[in-house]
Image: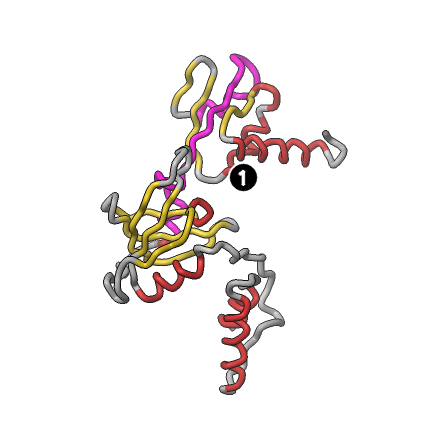
Amino acid sequence: VAVGLAARLWQSANLGEAARNALIKLRAAGTDVQASGSLGAVPHVDASDPSLPPLLEAARTSRSVRFDYVKSGAGEAMRRTIEPWGVLSYRQRWYVAGYDRDREAPRSFRLSRITGPVEMSGPPGEFTRPDDVDLLELVTGRDPDTEQTARIQVTATGAAGRLRTIATSEDDGVLTIPFTDVRALAPRVAAAGSSARVLEPDELAAAVVDVLRASAGDGCE
């Protein structure tokens, strides 16, 4: 059942062929693989990111990797060397989590922010993944590499009071709000209506517009 479910998830040119080959081999060996049927609703997972296959392989074989990474809010990519403990999809985005040798601490990295090729930098089996590590916690926790900062202009009066409660600072009517999920913050900003205007990042501004359009109906411009 697990293999059948995985095969349904790998809807990409990179991994689709490998999934099909695995199913063929298992069925040829007499294994009953449930690739369809009552497995429930399965969301589409985009596996087309070019850095995904080498990172999966590095995590499987316990090899360290190097890549250039553009951190949120940074203008230039920085070289990072990590021991990948695992790769996972969270909210339709891929992340690699592991030990960052440069920072000497566990970190997670969004694959869409990796620029250029992922290079293997060590031999197979060079590190051991900790038994008690929680990869999802590394991704969803307030990690510097997944956390973003929003700057939102608010009026002195109006419906922006709730935004002030989650802001870390306010300077001349501009709130600074750290966040990790743009889709969670966007509705809160939209609820403030004309009392709040997103200055940055652009991703949040676009998400707020989408929320407002959805609330007003398809005819909203």
Q: Nearer the viewer, residue 62 or 150?
A: 62
**Residue 186 lies within the magenta run:** no
Per the rendered image, the range of residues in magenta is: 136-165
Task: Give coordinates of residue 19: x percent, y percent.
Answer: 52, 71
**Residue 155 lies within the magenta run:** yes
Instruction: Work out whether 194 lies above or below 118.
Output: above
> In the picture provided, is 146 more to the left or to the right than 14?
left
Image quarter of the C terminus: top right
Task: Give coordinates of residue 158: x percent, y percent.
Answer: 57, 16
Q: Which residue is mark 1?
A: 183
Q: Which residue is at 62% across, 72% downward?
A: 37
Farthest residue to the front: give it. Answer: 116
Task: Give coordinates of residue 220: x percent, y percent.
Answer: 73, 31
The amino acid type of the residue labelled 1 equals: Arg
Task: Give coordinates of residue 153: x percent, y percent.
Answer: 51, 19
Farthest residue to the right: give it. Answer: 219
How many callouts does the rendering have? 1
Q: Nearer the viewer, residue 169 or 21?
A: 21
